[in-house]
Image: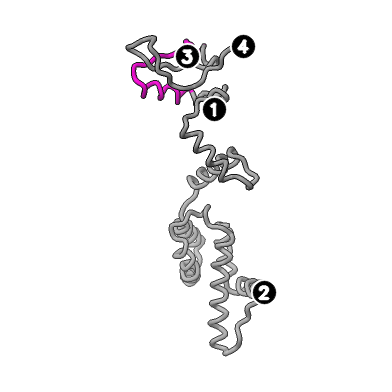
Amino acid sequence: MSRRAILRVVKTNYTPSAPWMVRVPQRLHRIEGARKKFFAKESIAKAYVERLAKQPGDYHSQALGLSDRQKLEASECYRLLEGRDASLFDAVHHYLTYVEQTKRSIPVSELFDEFLSAKQQDNVSPKYLADLRSKLGRFVNSFHDTLVCNVTVAEIEGWIRGLVLAQIRAQSMISQQEPQLDWRQTRQTYTRRSFRNEMRWFDNIG
């Protein structure tokens, strides 16, 4: 049975001028032109190992070549994932997807500026623009630097809830009546009457 090449740096006495050796995985023998590589400096040998590790193919050899620190880190990741019905691969894939989303996302304040710019190009009235700035400006102030991809539906609903209830309480103080606190009904009524256009903004976020 052939011996598997473990992807790691080994110190040898074969060549005193280049004591750091790396066994090249069999799948890369033809590409690298050798079964073993020798280096004068350990740092250069480790850099070579990192390059080989990025080559597709024998992942078993790569796993065997993990450092103690990497193994401990992987073990801790598995512990954190216990009972969550998710693998380490799932967690890493989810993180990489999230990173790609953040690269494409923009802050809420920047989206708001683009939204207002689009409305200005539509030749809406100055009064309408002022109304947008007044109502949505409060939301933008609350989530100014937050990336759009990080704003959750629950946060949007919570903010709208606070805005609606504040409006209801203000009206009840004027009319001296008890405020109507049926959330579903008041949300539908308020957004239909005075927040219809602004809801398109939240559609862009959510």
Q: Are marks 4 and 1 in contact (CB under 8 Å)?
A: no
User: Is-magenta flag for residue 33?
Assistant: yes
Measure the C-alpha gap from mark 3 to mark 1: 20 Å
Percent coordinates x, y for residue 22 in the rendering: 44, 17
| Segment colored magenta | 30-52
**Quarter-of-image position of residue 198:** bottom right
Which sits earlier in the primary sequence, circle 3 or circle 1? 3
Closest to the camera, between mark 3 and mark 1, is 1
- Say if 138 sits above or below 29 in the image: below
Q: Are marks 1 and 2 in contact (CB under 8 Å)?
A: no
Measure the C-alpha gap from mark 1 to mark 2: 58 Å
Percent coordinates x, y for residue 2 in the rendering: 59, 12
Colouring method of the image: one colour
Residue type, numbered disc 3? Glu
Residue type, numbered disc 1? Ala
Closest to the camera, between mark 1 and mark 2, is 1
- Say if 96 sits above or below 153 in the image: above
The residue under the point 36% across, 22% down is 42
Q: Which residue is mark 3?
A: 32
- Could you say whether the residue bearing mark 1 is in a helix, strand or loop? helix
Quarter of the image for the C terminus: give it: bottom right
Measure the C-alpha gap from mark 2 to mark 3: 71 Å
Quarter of the image for the N terminus: give it: top right
Q: Which residue is mark 1?
A: 63
Closest to the camera, between mark 3 and mark 4, is 4
- Could you say whether the residue bearing mark 2 is in a helix, strand or loop? helix
The residue under the point 64% across, 75% down is 186
Q: Which residue is mark 4?
A: 1
**Quarter-of-image position of residue 201:** bottom right
Closest to the camera, between mark 2 and mark 3, is 3
Q: Which residue is mark 2?
A: 185
Measure the C-alpha gap from mark 4 to mark 1: 20 Å
